[in-house]
Image: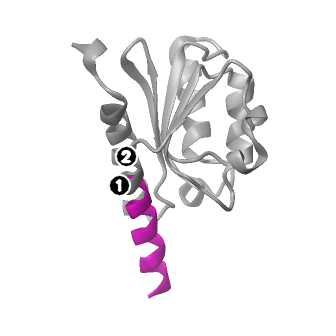
Amino acid sequence: MLSVLSDTYFMDQAIKEAEKAAQLDEVPVGAVIVCEGSIIARAHNQSEKLLDATAHAELLAITAASGHLGAKWLSQCTLFVTLEPCVMCAGALYWSRIGRLVYGASDDKRGFMRYGKPLLHPSTKVEYGVQNEKCKHLLQHFFESKRL
């Protein structure tokens, strides 16, 4: 059964993590890392809770996945994240050698793609736009509520 789970399914799991972040008044970004068809790590932004500007969902998920596998390389894993990673997170993805990155919404202001794929490890495959509207809506709703 696990082999039939789709990118949409895993992005929906990342969206659930983003919703947890929103409930905690964190920027709603969620991530899951999948290895061999199973989720091995889940995380959401916790910068406010931890008073740590680096506590992005991607970094927390990488740490959890590495702990789960007992390894620093994640070349057999896929990261699903609701928002295009920033440059800091792209650097961490480079060093973890993530095998595949799938993100939902683009980040035209702070996303790594404005600098090009070379920020990622050369072997990392990138896909984007999975559940784009859901991911984008979560972020838009969060920031609109801040402007009220």
At horizontal 37% and vertical 30% (from top left) the residue drawn is: 7
Quarter of the image for the C terminus: give it: bottom left
Q: Identity of the amino acid at label 1?
A: Lys
Q: Position of residue 100 (x, y in %)?
A: 56, 24
Q: Position of residue 104 (x, y in %)?
A: 46, 46
Q: CA distance from mark 2 to mark 1?
A: 6 Å
The question of residue 127 being in magenta is answered with no
What residue range appears in magenta? 134-148
Residue occupied by mark 1: 134
Residue 109 appears in which quarter of the rendering?
Answer: bottom right
Q: Which residue is outermost to the left?
A: 1
At horizontal 36% and vertical 18% (from top left) the residue drawn is: 38
Can the viewer see residue 24? Answer: no
Residue occupied by mark 2: 131
The question of residue 147 being in magenta is answered with yes
User: How crowded is the residue under tag 2: few (<14 C-alpha within 10 Å), some, or many (20+)?
Assistant: some
Q: Nearer the viewer, residue 88 or 67?
A: 88
At horizontal 35% and vertical 54% (from top left) the residue drawn is: 134
Q: Are marks 2 and 1 in contact (CB under 8 Å)?
A: yes
- The secondary structure that dominates the magenta segment is helix
Q: Is residue 146 above or below residue 19?
A: below
Q: Position of residue 133 (x, y in %)?
A: 37, 56
Q: Is residue 95 above or below residue 16?
A: above
Residue 9 appears in which quarter of the rendering?
Answer: top left
